[in-house]
Image (cartoon, grey):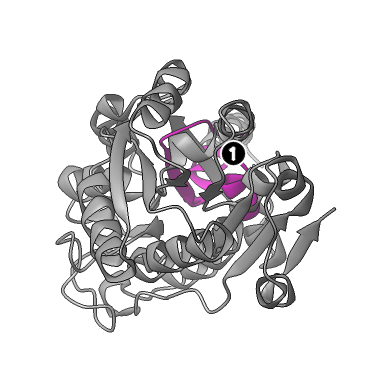
């Protein structure tokens, strides 16, 4: 081989190497996660577990870009815009606020909603069967859960007609959750006292306000930020001697009286399956919105005893877990 030709061939090979590596890196799909709380939340660990189960290796065959609002809903739109600028291949959202922000930020990048109470009522999708546009995901069917939570509280505290409702006004789904709970309360003959808390700093005041309004029990409406404060909320419920029911099981595990709802971690493991289908060519708008099939009832019997309450045997038999 001519010496000059040999040198050119070697030089071109050296240049092509980094370019090939860059092209290979660029071809690795990137998943944007829009988190209203923190990126260390169990939901996103479940998403990673789901992707690993499907054969993806983080950092090699898939890249996860997580952006966290750290409890500040007002930051969610800018974080959604940032992920869109990164040109992620799929956006995964948690809750109504991130889902809305993602939909407003892009009409082309596929969106997978990990948890949304009523995506049709919120105007995110056309229907559960055919969501349309660039969005799919999973729902939590909050209306049924709110009714059940009130029913459980009434069964345990039959003489209590006043119930406090703890909600986060920064959550766009708060108003819908209040309406659903009010409708359930009317059917059960209960009077509600709605108290707001945006985060940990508001919780003590909120519980004191509920006690002032003569609430005898508390329902905590679904919200990622309030769910993240389960330990603090359970401690305050014990301090003010208020039987409380929440959504996530770790609320009961932390000392709350009851928890009832689907496991959000399972939603995110399932979200990994939808992400996989989209990366393999499925259109998100053609993938039906999935609904949970299992709802967990967790009862903390130790807390019930501390509050002087008796749990009806029928409720204990129905429970998926009883904490002694």
Q: Position of residue 288 (x, y in %)?
A: 34, 80
Residue displayed at 49% across by 44% down: 23
Q: Position of residue 29 (x, y in %)?
A: 49, 52
Q: Nearer the viewer, residue 29 or 120?
A: 120
Badge 1 density bin: few <14, some 14–19, many ≥20, Cα 10 Å: some
Residue at the extreme front: 159
Q: Nearer the viewer, residue 178 or 243?
A: 243
Q: Is residue 108 left or right of residue 1?
A: left
**From the viewer's perspective, is residue 311 above or below residue 318?**
above
**From the viewer's perspective, is residue 90 above or below residue 14?**
below
Q: Is residue 286 left or right of residue 273?
A: left
Residue at the extreme bottom: 129
**From the viewer's perspective, is residue 319 above or below residue 98?**
below
Query: Residue 157's quadrant in the figure?
Result: bottom right
Q: Position of residue 58 (x, y in %)?
A: 65, 46
Query: Residue 263's quadrant in the figure?
Result: bottom right
Does the rendering let one see residue 61? no
Give the magenta-colored segment's residue range. 20-46
Q: Is residue 92 left or right of residue 316?
A: left
Which residue in the protein does label 1 denote?
A: 41
Residue displayed at 47% across by 48% down: 31
């Amino acid at each position: 081989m001519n010496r000059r030709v040999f040198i050119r061939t070697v030089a071109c090979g050296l240049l092509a190497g980094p370019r090939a590596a860059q092209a290979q890196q660029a071809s690795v799909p990137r998943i944007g996660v829009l988190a209203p709380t923190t990126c260390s939340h169990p939901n996103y660990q479940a998403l990673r577990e789901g992707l690993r189960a499907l054969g993806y290796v983080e950092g090699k065959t898939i890249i996860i870009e997580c952006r966290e609002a750290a409890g500040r809903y007002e930051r969610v739109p800018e974080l959604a815009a940032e992920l869109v600028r990164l040109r992620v291949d799929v956006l995964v959202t948690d809750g109504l606020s991130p889902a809305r922000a993602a939909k407003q930020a892009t009409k082309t990048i596929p969106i997978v909603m990990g948890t949304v109470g009523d995506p049709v009522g919120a105007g995110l999708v056309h229907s559960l069967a055919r969501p349309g546009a660039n969005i799919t995901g999973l729902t939590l069917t909050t209306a049924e859960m709110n009714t059940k939570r009130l029913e459980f509280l009434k069964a345990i505290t039959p003489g209590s007609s006043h119930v406090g409702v703890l909600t986060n006004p920064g959550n766009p789904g708060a108003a819908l959750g209040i309406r659903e709970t009010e409708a359930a309360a009317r059917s059960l003959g209960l009077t509600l006292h709605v108290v707001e808390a945006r985060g940990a700093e508001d919780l003590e005041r909120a519980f004191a306000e509920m006690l002032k309004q003569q609430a005898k029990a508390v329902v905590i409406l679904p919200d990622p930020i309030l769910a993240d404060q389960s330990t603090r909320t359970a401690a305050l419920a014990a301090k003010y001697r208020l039987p409380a029911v929440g959504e996530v099981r770790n609320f009961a595990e932390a000392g709350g009286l009851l928890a009832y709802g689907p496991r959000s971690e399972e939603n995110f493991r399932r979200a990994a399956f939808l992400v996989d289908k989209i990366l393999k060519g499925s259109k998100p708008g053609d993938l039906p919105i999935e609904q949970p099939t299992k709802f967990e009832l967790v009862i903390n019997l130790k807390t019930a005893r501390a509050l002087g309450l008796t749990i009806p045997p029928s409720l204990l038999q129905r429970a998926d877990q009883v904490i002694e």
